[in-house]
Image (tube, coloured by chain):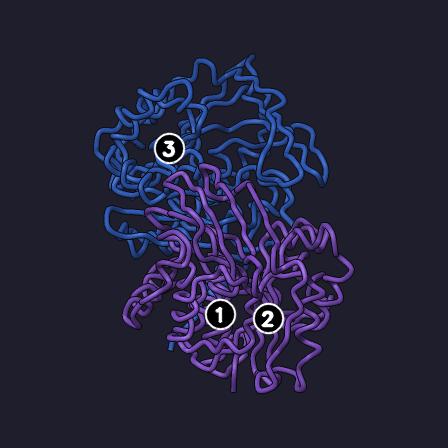
Chain colours: A blue, B purple
Amino acid sequence: MSLLIVGTVAFDAIETPFGKTDKIVGGAASYISLAASYFYKDIELVSVVGDDFPQTFLNTLKSTGVKLNGLQIKKGEKSFFWSGKYHNDLNTRDTLDTQLNVLENFDPIVPEDAKQPDFLMLGNLVPAVQQKVITQLTKRPKLIVLDTMNFWMDIAMDELKKTIAMIDVLTINDSEARQLSGEYSLVKAAQKILAMGPTTLVIKKGEHGALLFNKDEVFFAPALPLEEVFDPTGAGDSFAGGFIGYLAKTKDISFENMKRAIIFGSAMASFTVEKFGTERLIGLSAKDIENRVQEFVDLVQFDIS
Amino acid sequence: MSLLIVGTVAFDAIETPFGKTDKIVGGAASYISLAASYFYKDIELVSVVGDDFPQTFLNTLKSTGVKLNGLQIKKGEKSFFWSGKYHNDLNTRDTLDTQLNVLENFDPIVPEDAKQPDFLMLGNLVPAVQQKVITQLTKRPKLIVLDTMNFWMDIAMDELKKTIAMIDVLTINDSEARQLSGEYSLVKAAQKILAMGPTTLVIKKGEHGALLFNKDEVFFAPALPLEEVFDPTGAGDSFAGGFIGYLAKTKDISFENMKRAIIFGSAMASFTVEKFGTERLIGLSAKDIENRVQEFVDLVQFDIS
């Protein structure tokens, strides 16, 4: 059994109504790996950074059980950098700067001993690069989960659809589900998207929770109403990390178990937004996670007598 | 035991992306009464219409158990009329026309034998008129629920706050909760609003469900992901009607029972939006409602093992 995670490991500079950061560690695969590591230890990471990337964060990843044989460190090059500013409602943001750097020519190389993962999590990346990972595998994983975004729908829809046809679970937000399907109703959107190949669709609605669809069933997981959302960056990736980590741990990809996985994913996301960057995802205890999950149970449980 | 419902009984003309209506029956109290009547039969309505209002709809109300002794029919005057057009997302709308007519000088008169209700539901109206109903009662109801809207926050905030201080449960939407409290976080907004007097706050989030707060607890009820929302008019009022009707039926105003009441309210709202106006709220069977509530149970139930 193993879990292969592919995505960006990068720098972010973030401004929210509550403060701003200099360059801090970010990137989809950073959040995914940290969140997944609380549930499962046999994780391989495939990504790329420049030699400007801090070894301390890589050590943190290693210490949580993430293997870095597939992490390319490009000498004399710079890591991917994104800078953004959130609006007052924290639901929308402007990109201030994007420097692709090492990502421009990223050619993912899956290490030999990682070519037969049971679980594959493809974080948001160029769809062609995501495909390139799938085609290197020598055994079809039990489950492939793919995250993507509107940007690729705008500029590479055909390639994206080809990639989506190769996977099992797609995670996107509500406006992306509408864009991808051309349907406003999320129920109709889900059915159209499932017809593109995946057996399962997760629609992330941020502060409004998440919906899980397969052909016949639907499940809704709320987001916790938080007193303060400090920085939403990485929430979706932490969600994906908790989701795939819990599935890898439990080795059960039934719809019933995916419901549980979504709750654990939501719990991990609820930690991430409490501080800037990856800070809150480091050093959580099993009890912290258990208590947070219990808050979800308490939030939605009712008993119709 | 009895339930007193106060609010508009009126005409609407509605345009949605799916069609448009001529003048049809609408008004907060129409939806509230119909929705509540599925749970509870001892209902008194206080409202006002002109002599242009169709007797057939009044007969429908009577047939569901709603007493109309407090309904004033103004000879030679016209009923309140509202016309609106929904945008493509159905979450926002433009008001095309508002004719106050009989509402302009509405002086609510609670019939003598309705002055000691156990439950009082104040639908959206001028806050001073809502107050005038409370002050006519000769016994404090077990529970007073009040619905209002941003319009009164814009033009009559002081009067509205006085009214809010007199009630138990306030129902508003998320942007109204933010406006009323000056807080963006709904958790903080809820605590500020509860400090204004009510013991309980319901924040309606439309397609994103509803939150129930008291000082120490929070509960989240989802909205059903519907294949097609046809006309959102009256959804919030149907929700309030199901909520208060269920509480009146069960005579239990604990937080635990309010959770159930919110699910029944959400179920009633989910029917309303399937057709124009009040159409879908007429002639439902007990089985229809039971099945719909089961869909809510199925939607959110999970079992963390």
State the residue at coordinates (40%, 47%): A243
Work out how far the residue at label 3 is from the one at label 1, CA to CA, in angstroms. 44 Å
Viewer-proximal residue among A237 and B152: B152
Left or right side of B49 for A184: left
**Where residue A95 is drawn, which disc sits there?**
none
The residue at 66%/82% (across/down) is B137
Task: Estimate how packed mark 1 is, as few (under 14), some (14 to 19) or many (20 or more) residues with alpha carbons within 10 Å.
Answer: many
Residue A213, position in %: x, y? 31, 47
User: Residue A122 bears which disc, if any?
Assistant: 3
**Which residue is under mark 2?**
B145
Q: Does mark 2 fall on the same chain as mark 3?
A: no
Pointer 1 indicates a residue of which chain?
B
Callout 1: helix, strand or loop? helix
- Residue A117 visible in the displayed image: no
> Mark 1 — residue?
B243
Q: Is the residue under label 1 in contact with that under label 2 (CB below 8 Å)?
A: yes
